[in-house]
């Protein structure tokens, strides 16, 4: 019965994975375009389809013996980013009157189509060589065993400090870097694809294999280590202030444990003690090493929280995943994080939330609605006339402003931002999971496209 349920889930999910490159193009168009997001998404789809069509045409002409070239998420990433660049530059272009109909946003799909033909030529020429490099690199990482898994975990966590982990893990999840395996008679590439293929295979027996080494190490860090670090930071706050700051730590710890979203915790110490983040990244790498060494074989969809642990660890049975070892290691991992963080914070006087005198008002607990807080955020950003564009990722409210100096960072922190960064002439306020909600409210108030 359970196997049947997962077969249905896998069949539904396989539709997404089969069209992942196309969906990524759409997402890039919607997420990165400054305005007319629908046009940008449509242009990205047109560009990707023309690029793949160009590649197939070139294969039939010059290399008919080749079955096909699948650029996967890399081709999608290149085409999506190029489309957004063209869209943001030409969406308001004015053409001569005779060609006026093709001006503005209508010009974007046209110029994207020509660019896609050029990109298709490039991929036809370079992709077979590049794909060979990916396969060789994947085989090299596999031959390194648990050491290779350590470097993956360490570098992915380290790059997360600047948001570049989104450029690393898809290469392992969806390309040859993550391994190649034959499942139910079909060759599957990419760690996550391998895991879900095995999950849907009714004939699969024993531990899940290659597809899980790039996932299993996350669970101990996200479910045990970082929540324990949260407790350590809480205990480092003077007792008189703990009542003011406790909700921040509790919310961040629960978010990490349940969903695997770790930024609310990591940003508490990343900017005040970058070396402590490097230490945390090292421990995360060690967690990946231990999970690989112990043959813990749990996959995930999004992150390493309890939701994925339940679905892809506990419910799959210990004989398939070794999930019990996650709990055993997790107890020691929590102690390691707690005592390490408490010692380092007190030893080097790290100013985590609640420790500095000026931070007593960093978290302004309020029962205001999202709309009311959004109005306050607009004021803190220098009022509506200072705001050019508002967007958000999972944890950050990203705002392009005319004058960064007009932004009241202290006020944004008082409204719940863990930190406020200046990036590329704009502002990134780290509100955690509320970032996307604030984005929608702010855009609605400003009367701008969301």
Image (cartoon, rainbow, N blue to C red):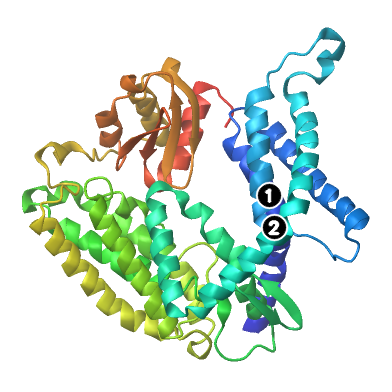
Q: Residue 331: image x %, image y %?
A: 27, 78
In the picture, residue 12 is in which quadrant?
Answer: bottom right
In the picture, residue 250 is in which quadrant?
Answer: bottom left
Using the image, determine if residue 18 lies above or below residue 202: above
Using the image, determine if residue 226 lies above or below residue 140: above
Q: Residue 257: image x %, image y %?
A: 36, 65
Mark 2 burial class by Cα count in 10 Å: few <14, some 14-19, many 20+? some
Q: Which residue sits at x=39%, y=36%?
A: 428
Q: Secondary structure at mark 1?
A: helix
Q: Secondary structure at mark 2?
A: helix
Residue 103 tag number: none
- How far apart marks 2 and 1 lie (CA) works out to 6 Å
Residue of label 1: 76
Q: Residue 268: image x %, image y %?
A: 26, 49
Residue 5 visible in the shown view: no
Q: Tags 2 and 1 in contact by the CB under 8 Å rule?
A: yes
Residue 72 tag number: 2
Q: Quadrant of the C terminus?
A: top right
Which of the two residues, 82 or 265, is positioned nearer the viewer here?
82
Residue 172 visible in the shown view: yes
Which of the two residues, 248 or 221, is positioned nearer the viewer here?
221
Q: Which residue sits at x=12%, y=43%?
A: 356
Q: Residue 180: image x %, image y %?
A: 65, 75
Left or right for 195, reference 285:
right
Mark 1 burial class by Cα count in 10 Å: few <14, some 14-19, many 20+? many
In the picture, residue 128 is in which quadrant?
Answer: bottom right
Which of the two residues, 237 or 43, is positioned nearer the viewer here?
43
Q: Quadrant of the N terminus?
A: bottom right
């Amino acid at each position: 019965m359970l196997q049947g349920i997962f077969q249905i889930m896998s069949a539904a999910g396989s539709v997404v994975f089969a069209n992942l490159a196309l969906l990524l193009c759409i997402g890039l168009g919607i997420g990165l375009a400054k305005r007319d997001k629908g046009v940008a998404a449509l242009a990205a789809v047109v560009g990707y389809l023309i690029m793949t069509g160009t590649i197939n045409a070139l294969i039939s002409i010059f290399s008919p013996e080749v079955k096909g070239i699948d650029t996967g998420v890399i081709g999608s990433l290149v085409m999506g980013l190029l489309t957004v660049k063209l869209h943001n530059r030409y969406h308001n272009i004015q053409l001569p009157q005779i060609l006026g109909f093709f001006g503005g946003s209508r010009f974007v799909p046209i110029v994207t189509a020509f660019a896609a033909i050029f990109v298709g030529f490039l991929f036809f020429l370079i992709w077979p060589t590049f794909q060979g490099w990916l396969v060789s690199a994947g085989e090299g990482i596999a031959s390194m065993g648990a050491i290779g898994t350590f470097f993956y975990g360490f570098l992915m966590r380290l790059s997360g400090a600047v948001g570049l982990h989104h450029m690393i893990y898809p290469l392992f999840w969806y390309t040859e870097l993550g391994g190649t395996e034959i499942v139910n008679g079909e060759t599957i590439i990419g760690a996550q694809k391998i895991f879900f293929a095995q999950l849907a295979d009714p004939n699969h027996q024993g531990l899940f294999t290659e597809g899980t080494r790039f996932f299993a190490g996350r669970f101990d860090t996200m479910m045990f280590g970082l929540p324990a670090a949260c407790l350590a930071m809480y205990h480092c706050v003077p007792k008189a202030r703990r009542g003011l700051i406790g909700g921040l730590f509790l919310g961040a710890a629960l978010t990490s444990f349940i969903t695997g979203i770790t930024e609310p915790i990591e940003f508490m110490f990343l900017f005040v003690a970058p070396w402590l983040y490097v230490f945390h990244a090292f421990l995360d790498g060690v967690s990946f090493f231990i999970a690989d060494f112990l043959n813990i074989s749990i996959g995930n969809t999004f992150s390493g929280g309890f939701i994925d642990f339940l679905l892809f660890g506990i419910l799959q049975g210990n004989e398939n995943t070794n999930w019990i070892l996650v709990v055993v290691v997790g107890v020691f991992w929590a102690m390691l994080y707690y005592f390490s963080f408490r010692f380092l914070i007190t030893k080097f006087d790290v100013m985590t939330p609640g420790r500095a005198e000026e931070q007593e008002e960093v978290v302004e607990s309020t029962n205001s609605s999202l709309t009311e807080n959004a109005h306050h955020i607009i004021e803190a950003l220098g009022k509506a006339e200072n705001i050019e564009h508002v967007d958000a990722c999972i944890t950050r409210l990203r705002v392009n402003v005319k004058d960064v100096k007009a932004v009241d960072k202290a006020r944004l922190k008082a409204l719940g931002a863990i930190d406020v960064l200046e990036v590329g002439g704009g502002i990134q306020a780290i509100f955690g999971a509320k970032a996307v909600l604030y984005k929608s409210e702010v855009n609605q108030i400003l009367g701008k496209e969301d």
